[in-house]
Amino acid sequence: MAGPRPVVLSGPSGAGKSTLLKKLMKEYDSVFGFSVSHTTRNPRPGEVNGKDYHFVTREAMQTGIENGDFIEHAEFSGNMYGTSKAAVQDVQAKNLICILDIDMQGVRSIKRADLNPIYISIQPPSMEVLEHRLRDRKTESEESLQKRLHAARVDMEISKEQGLFDTVIVNDSLEEAHGQLKAVLLEEIQKVKKTNMSS
Ligand SMILES: Nc1nc2c(ncn2[C@@H]2O[C@H](COP(=O)(O)OP(=O)(O)O)[C@@H](O)[C@H]2O)c(=O)[nH]1
Ligand SMILES: Nc1ncnc2c1ncn2[C@@H]1O[C@H](COP(=O)(O)OP(=O)(O)O)[C@@H](O)[C@H]1O
């Protein structure tokens, strides 16, 4: 039997993707699994290798790409990011809903793959709010922040494209955005709960 459909969460850096997916995974224990991407960026304080990302060198990442280990990969804000086949398979082997947190280039690549996910865009209420949140997060240098804001403007334009996403959620109030995310995923959540209860 085919497993549950994966979920792609995309949207500007700082829109609240990690916050929303962590909240979702906490509320639904044993329903979701995170696709742990590879990246060449440095870990932030508190980030765990193998849990938040596989933190690797550019050389290791290049070798993996050449070996065909990746479903998709992209360059974002001066670093490489990619979804390995193993990252998705690890989650799907447990019959969990696989969540991919990927940028717009990743969305376009995944559309050409045979993953058939639900595409959800998480958007900030405005550029001003986004900038505040990114500054308050205190994870970025001014240079990195500016790169992210530039990419965010592009992302916010592209995400309006018809047919690219199944749902666009504006993360103004966290509780409301969380509620909308749950509503979109309810059918898949119930399927997984049912299957995993009877197995
Ligand atoms: N294409 C692609 N994008 C990714 C992957 N992993 C993370 N990203 C995206 O890379 C961007 C930067 O992520 P990150 O450095 O964690 O910063 P943050 O979004 O500001 O928390 C975000 O838009 C992520 O969605 C991946 O495996 N593939
Ligand atoms: N609805 C919200 N209201 C206020 N702050 C938020 C909200 N959602 C997320 N944040 C904060 O905004 C920052 C960016 O969120 P984060 O989840 O890291 O975004 P992303 O993963 O999309 O880059 C974090 O500091 C987070 O705590």
Image (spheres, rainbow, N blue to C red):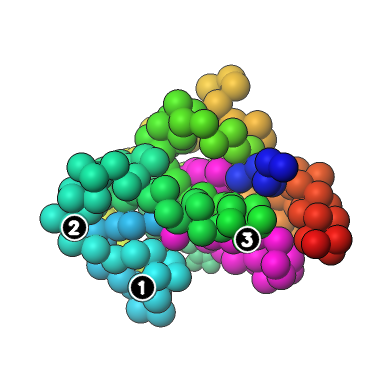
Q: Is residue 78 visible?
A: no
Q: Which residue is mark 3?
A: 94
For marks 1 and 2, give the one nearer the viewer.
2
Q: Quadrant of residue 192?
A: bottom right
Q: Earlier in the sequence, mark 2 or mark 3?
A: 2
For marks 1 and 3, give the one nearer the viewer.
3
Question: In x, y percent, where is residue 170?
Answer: 63, 44
Q: How far apart are the two marked residues, 1 and 2, measured between alpha carbons?
A: 15 Å
135 or 100, nearer to the observer? 100
| 197 up-or-down from 68: above or below | below
Q: Quadrant of residue 24?
A: bottom right
The tag on residue 60 is 2
| 184 up-or-down from 174: above or below | above
In the rendered image, the quadrant that contains the N terminus is: top right
What crowding class fits label 1: few (fewer than 14 Cα within 10 Å), some (14-19), or many (20 or more)? few
Tell me, yes or no, whether the two marked residues, 1 and 3, touch with CB atoms within 8 Å: no
Q: How far apart are the two marked residues, 2 and 3, measured between alpha carbons?
A: 27 Å
Q: Which residue is mark 1?
A: 49
What secondary structure is marked by label 2? helix
Q: How far apart are the two marked residues, 1 and 3, measured between alpha carbons?
A: 21 Å
